[in-house]
Image (cartoon, rainbow, N blue to C red):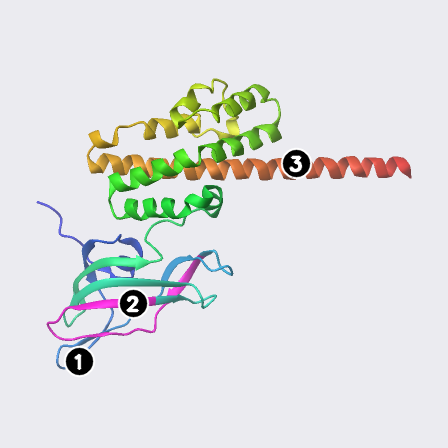
Amino acid sequence: MDKEEKPLLIEEFLKDVSPNQSKKIKVHGTADVFGNFRIVFGDIELFCESDKCKGPRYFSTSLSPVLRSGKNENLYIEFNCNNCKKGFKIFSIFLGVDNVGMGIAYKYGELPPYGPQTSSKLISMIGEDKEMFLAGRRAEFQGMGIGAFAYYRRVVENQRNRIIDKIVDVSTKLGNYEKLIEELKIAKTKKTFSESLDEIKIAFPEILQLNGHNPLTLLHKALSEGIHDLPDEECLELATSIRQILTELVEKMNAALKEQKELDSAVTKLLNRKKTKNNQ
């Protein structure tokens, strides 16, 4: 026999449950003699996108709706960042509770969209395809696998040369990857992502590998699946893999360039210090 679903606190529901789902919930508040229930929302830890924060912060709301006895309500609830006072999150939900705060909630949607924070470095690299990537992200977190896969594949194909250019930058900074750089430049002349991969035979720098694998090969493996031959669930898995691999690759490339820049700076300072001592 299936275990009975344990009710979530309304704050857990708002933070952790993706749109288009319903859950048993529990809310805090007080009931009057007529059975109406006034809800009191606790604070929720969310990612604040404001320039001042750019990180996890606690959000609160002044809204304290009263649900009439035996009635269900559609609610818009706005939470605001307690730190900067500018970051916000709006939830659209259907809610019904009894006079002890137990009930059911359905999430229509939220703004900014549900899902993990998208790397600003990834958004910067994607450039003009930002909105297409975010559309894919929304489709992914709404469980629409075919749509998410199609959006992400278009982004990778469109930004193939920018991804390759960034890998060339890293390889140039690291040194001793002349052959790889030559192959990457030839790869840019090809028409498709798949043809580009055929040109790359030299191993990638270890610092860019994902669990020991060439990240472009991993992307190609996911992208080469026939989208029309797969059920939506499998397309969703592939779409998630594409987003995660692309995000991790961009983070690794930026980290490698930062480390090399810091190393170059340290070497320059030591050499300049030695010159200064010799001239004294």
Badge 2, how many Cα within 10 Å: few under 14, some, many 20+? some
- Image quadrant containing the N terminus: top left
Q: Which mark is residue 263?
A: 3
Badge 1, how many Cα within 10 Å: few under 14, some, many 20+? few
Pick the front one: 131 or 105: 131
| Residue 261 position (above or below residue 64) | above
Of the residues tagged 3 and 2, which is closer to the observer?
2
Residue 102 is drawn in which quadrant? Answer: bottom left
Within the magenta stretch, is there residue 47?
no
**Coordinates of residue 80 in the picture (x, y in percent):** 39, 67
Which region of the structure is painted magenta? 56-78
Looking at the image, which residue sits at the far left?
1
Looking at the image, which residue sits at the far right?
280
Mark 1 belongs to which amino acid? Asp
Q: Which mark is residue 32?
A: 1
**Coordinates of residue 133 in the picture (x, y in percent):** 37, 44
Dot 2 lies on which element? strand
Residue 216 is drawn in which quadrant? Answer: top left
